[in-house]
Amino acid sequence: MFPRGRKILLGVSGGISAYKSCDLLRRLQDHGFIVDVVPTQASLNFVGKSTWEALSGRKVYMDLWSDVEKIPHISMAKENDLIVIAPATADLLAKLAAGRADDLLTNIVLASTAPKVLVPAMHTEMWLNPATTENVDTLRKRGFIVVEPDEGRMTGTDIGVGRYPESTKIIKAIDDALIATSDLVGKKIIITAGGTREPIDPIRFIGNRSSGKQGFALAMAAASRGAQVHLVTANTELPNIEGITVTNVETAEQMLAVLDLEFPHCDALIMSAAVADAKVVNYSDFKIGKESLNTLALIKNPDILKSLSGTKKPGQILIGFAAETISDVKELEANATAKLLSKSLDMIYVNNVAGGAIFGSNVTQGLIIDRDKNIIQVPEISKDTLADILLDQLVSKLG
Ligand code: CTP
């Protein structure tokens, strides 16, 4: 079973067997997938929008002209790990083969780079018609996975090839298609994001400028590669990610408490959160007058990574982050290597945040260093891309 977090888009075109896709949707949910349904207008003659909304538990988009500000065809094309179209009518196959995009579903298909599984279902004569056969060939050549229809009773009294297959056969094709992008299936990964805040009084805190964007990018990328992800966030303003377990904490101690419980059960911990190094010795229940701020007594926070690395089991991987204000690359490298060794990390990503760079931004640049002193120079790239590079490294270290 695929873990939570993987998303599938179920396109439904206008064939009588559309009702069978209600079962497919349920079975996909049983397998842990989150499913968005996009019915074509014609399919609504067989199964209505309300049925899809009730079964999927999600809003159903049907045309290009609703919620235009959310650009649904692009966001749905990007968000989903796989597209399955069941049933796929002869007309829809022809449209896809021609690269047409005159409704929401066909626009999504053209805009998506995810694997695509087609489940043709139609009368035997239509399936065997040379026009359909050629369209199927064209689509297969372009990388579409076309599930062979079953043989048996059709609508009415006819018998032949063209039946909508059993849900299990379709789900097998989906599982096979996802294997290539599922290199973290079965792995439990904890990712921390954001920055801890250490309260001084009810109004003030010691904190930092970490936005949490990198941790969220990692969580999304890991989930879409099949990992079971637990995201521990500290003071981020990013929306929750569907299908990912999220625990919100405020302080370093709260983060440590969660990780103390969870770390023994994970395969990897990616510590992208910025942990405040210090907290006040005595929290004040009342606002401290500014004259007392000069003498605020501070004490170091526990070093979470150091404390967890002491309990690390063979095979567990620890990845740290470091934000520095060092522009000299050699110095940056030496500093990060020292942190990697002192915290017994398997890998560290270090970047130079001088002048307000990186924090809150969608891009990053830095160095990835591992225990074997391998260094990857990361040029300016998106945090999403860095997430995938780090996960590639993680996969190779997990073996
Ligand atoms: N970290 C941690 N616990 C802390 C501080 C940091 O687990 N109390 C983690 C961070 O999440 C990060 C890594 O350690 O993954 C390096 O963080 P950084 O703040 O650069 O390290 P420090 O050891 O605090 O070093 P510095 O003195 O440069 O702040």
Image (cartoon, rainbow, N blue to C red):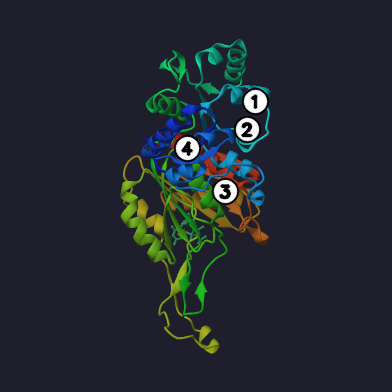
Q: Secondary structure at mark 2?
A: helix
User: Is 155 drawn above or below residue 264 in the view shown?
Assistant: above
Residue 333: numbered disc: 3
User: Is 39 drawn above or below residue 286 in the view shown?
Assistant: above
Q: Tell me if mark 4 has few (under 14), some (14-19) or many (20+) residues whose alpha carbon lies within 10 angstroms of its own.
A: many
Q: Residue at x 66, y 51 (%)?
A: 69
Q: Tell me if mark 3 has few (under 14), some (14-19) or many (20+) residues whose alpha carbon lies within 10 angstroms of its own.
A: many
Q: Earlier in the sequence, mark 1 or mark 4?
A: 1
What is the distance, in whole Å, between disc 2 and disc 3 at their CAs?
A: 48 Å
Residue 106: numbered disc: 2
The x, y position of residue 178, in whole percent, is 47, 30
Dots 1, 4 in contact, CB < 8 A: no
Dots 1, 3 in contact, CB < 8 A: no
Residue 225: numbered disc: 4
* Nearest-to-viewer mark from 2 and 4: 2
Q: Earlier in the sequence, mark 2 or mark 1?
A: 1
Q: Residue at x 57, y 18 (%)?
A: 140
* Nearest-to-viewer mark from 2 and 3: 2
| Amino acid type shown at disc 1 | Lys
The foreground one among 300 and 104 is 104
Q: Earlier in the sequence, mark 1 or mark 3?
A: 1
* Nearest-to-viewer mark from 3 and 4: 4
| Amino acid type shown at disc 3 | Glu
Q: Secondary structure at mark 1?
A: helix
| Amino acid type shown at disc 2 | Thr
Dots 2, 1 in contact, CB < 8 A: yes
What is the distance, in whole Å, between disc 1 and disc 4 at their CAs?
A: 30 Å
The x, y position of residue 115, in whole percent, is 54, 29
What is the distance, in whole Å, between disc 1 and disc 3 at their CAs?
A: 54 Å
User: Is 126 drawn above or below residue 326 in the view shown?
Assistant: above
